[in-house]
Image (cartoon, rainbow, N blue to C red):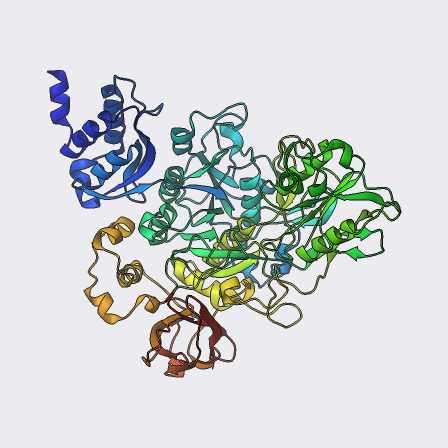
Amino acid sequence: MERKLLQFACPPFIFFLLLLITSISAVEHLQTYIVRVDADAKPSIFPTHAHWYETAVLAAAASSDGSAAWTPGGPLIHTYSSLFHGFSARLSPSAAASLASSPGVLAVLPELIRHPDTTRSPEFLGLLSSDRTGLLAESDYGSELVIAVVDTGITPAHRSFSDRGLGPAPARWRGECVSGPGFPASSCNRKLIGARYFSGGYEATSGRMNESAELRSPRDTDGHGTHTASIAAGRYVFPASTLGYARGVAAGMAPKARLAAYKVCWAAGCFDSDILAAFDAAVADGVDVVSLSVGGVVVPYYLDAIAVGAFAAAEAGIFVSASAGNGGPGGLTVTNVAPWVATVGAGSMDRDFPADVKLGNGRVLPGVSVYGGPALTTGRLYPLVYAGAAQGAGDGYSSSLCLEGSLNLDAVKDKIILCDRGVNSRAAKGEVVRKAGAVGMILANGVFDGEGLVADCHVLPATAVGAVAGDEIRKYIAAATPKSPATATILFRGTRLGVRPAPVVASFSARGPNPQAPEILKPDIIAPGLNIIAAWPDNVGPASIPSDQRRTEFNILSGTSMACPHVSGLAALLKAAHPDWSPAAIKSALMTTAYVKDNRGTTMLDESTGNSSDVFDFGSGHVNPQRAMDPGLVYDLTPTDYVNFLCNLNYTQQNIKAITRRAADCRGARKAGHAGNLNYPSFSAVFVEDGTKRRMSTHFIRTVRNVGNGAAVYRATVRAPEGSTVTVEPTELAFRRAGQKLSFLVRVKAATAEKLAPGSSSVRSGALTWSDGRHSANSPIVVTVQAPLS
């Protein structure tokens, strides 16, 4: 009788869910799914969060057979209320399919597992604390803004997170400081004003965490989150260095901005259900910026948990920046490609850490390293061998990569070993070589990596060289004879400033075009991401391998993970200086003021090839924060604009509602144009060359708002992509007042004479610039012509 009353007390949908989950066989393969429910059904289905928790208890109680469907806390992992209405749960594929077709369910998303993708960078970006009129001063260093860092947690006692001189947290702040092992409630202060952790998705899939290796708290046991948080908003710290390298004053982009840490990344990765729970909490807590240095596979926006979470955040006025990914230099590798997200690639600065290879024949080949231990004996040349020829019990391929257990100890002892890059981490290769008894390591890039170099904190004397140098060293070793053996040493030259050319696009930085919507150019911008020094935990070695017992207060890392928080911090400064700007307006300001020329005055180079880079490498260019503070014009966007964009991608009503939580009327959107007509600060035209004489032309409609001080007249200058014709109507925009909006039309016509091989494409780029003599708003124009496969 009691059970019957409970059943009738549950809403019909919940009863259906209980029956569905309890019927799952223990032998079925289970996976985490994220379930979104129609907001209109919320009063009858999900009245409160408490009701959700009650439902989870009921479901757990109903599973008396010990089914494998149950996680330690019941079938429900997380519930969501700020981003959207829904939950995450462990279900079989058949159960998920049944659930997806039930009334009131908008979407059932299979969970994806993602992974985490400075003393010089503020100065390199022109952010000088001595400047009384620049962006730092105008924004009060971001003191009233809150940046959410969604990552591996944070090290609260680090000097970069001191609250000295800061006032109380902003009055609107509603967040919490969740305590746990290694993270007492007193860990938060007026700088680190909030900290949470989310492990439900991780543990539902991977089992209960090993608490001897990980901490069930916001405490960072990896280092990545501490590093990215201090890049975004670290305080001024002096002295700062890593093993003696990059000495100076460390500072984040917004030194007075408040931080809220949301730990979602664990030993097995960063799980979508946990990431969404962090977004949900961040929106409810009242953050201004979300910084997400996490990447993964690209899927349609309605199946992308980050895109879904970021849309709700942007709708709430929160700027979201995300790393573009480290899959470069190949094309179509960019991730986090939703247009409501600032997608950030990585570039270099004018600083590096040279560690050159000197061969026995006198040749000196360039390399980089951050090694602070005992150096090799000055003036001595050591025997040099290629790891591929020093295999132990394994094969030559494994030994060439210096994989664990692959090296012949007798063949490598007291020698310098040349290892190929790939499979295991660069630092792990050094540990393998060190344990084998070698005195040093040269890490050589393969063809795919090209000339892109990353300086690592190796555990033995080691350096990284490019593909060309690697080939030369292999040939030198192969040509050695008993009378003329191969020898080498490594020359560590410390920190070098004033490097030219700079910036260059980092080899690893993921490239466009946008795999989901080529009409939207991605990445949006690049920022410093190569060899960045920032805060580091006191319980993690700088090489990030268990055997590294060295300790350093700061560490040097590379990745788009490091570039992303630069933009997050800059967005906080811009938001503080312009409180009325939307997230889209802030992104527009960063994009239209970005630059594409290096410190030699030529187009930025692609580190992997040494050739000029292009818009698929850097998007609109490299961030220029001082110009972004006063961009003159901005391209703004509303949630309705994004809905129209999704309509023009031919998404279904169900697809759109899964992202936006509302029904969409696509009739007007599809009549008005195409996906490229989103009011974006860049232009991307895609044509198919099908052999007919059909005209390859399109148009873009854009609206800009005058954010200058008053009346202004802007004139258009066009640099058309080679072989294309670009016209702008009108060519002059006369603003009578600040805040006024004016629209213009851009027509693009591509040449039809070019003959392309089946399946190939041609990409040409140009630019449109609006200038009033004081401001210049630049937008890239890219024209892609594709040939069908047959």
Point out residue 520 in the picture as x, y percentages from the top left corner.
Answer: 39, 64
Instruction: Name the residue located 64 percent from the left edge and 43 percent from the top edge.
Output: 426
Q: Is residue 750 above or below residue 211?
A: below
Q: Quadrant of the C terminus?
A: bottom left
Tell which of 697 and 583 is nearer to you. 697
Tell which of 553 and 144 is nearer to you. 553
Tell which of 54 and 116 is nearer to you. 116
In this picture, residue 669 sits left or right of residue 118? left
Q: Is residue 34 above or below residue 362?
A: above
Q: Quadrant of residue 748?
A: bottom left
Q: Quadrant of residue 33?
A: top left
Tell which of 690 and 533 is nearer to you. 690
In this picture, residue 621 sits left or right of residue 484? left
Point out residue 70 in the picture as x, y percentages from the top left corner.
Answer: 31, 24
Work out whether residue 216 can be spotted.
Answer: yes
Q: Quadrant of the N terminus?
A: top left
Instruction: Name the residue located 65 percent from the left edge and 40 percent from the top edge.
Output: 396
Work out whether residue 164 can be spotted.
Answer: no
Number of dots carrying numbers: 0
In this picture, residue 673 sits left or right of residue 549? left
Point out residue 59 in the picture as x, y percentages from the top left corner.
Answer: 24, 24
Point out residue 222 in the picture as x, y percentages from the top left corner.
Answer: 56, 36
Q: Is residue 544 above or below residue 454?
A: above
In this picture, residue 136 sits left or right of residue 746? right
Q: Quadrant of residue 126?
A: bottom right
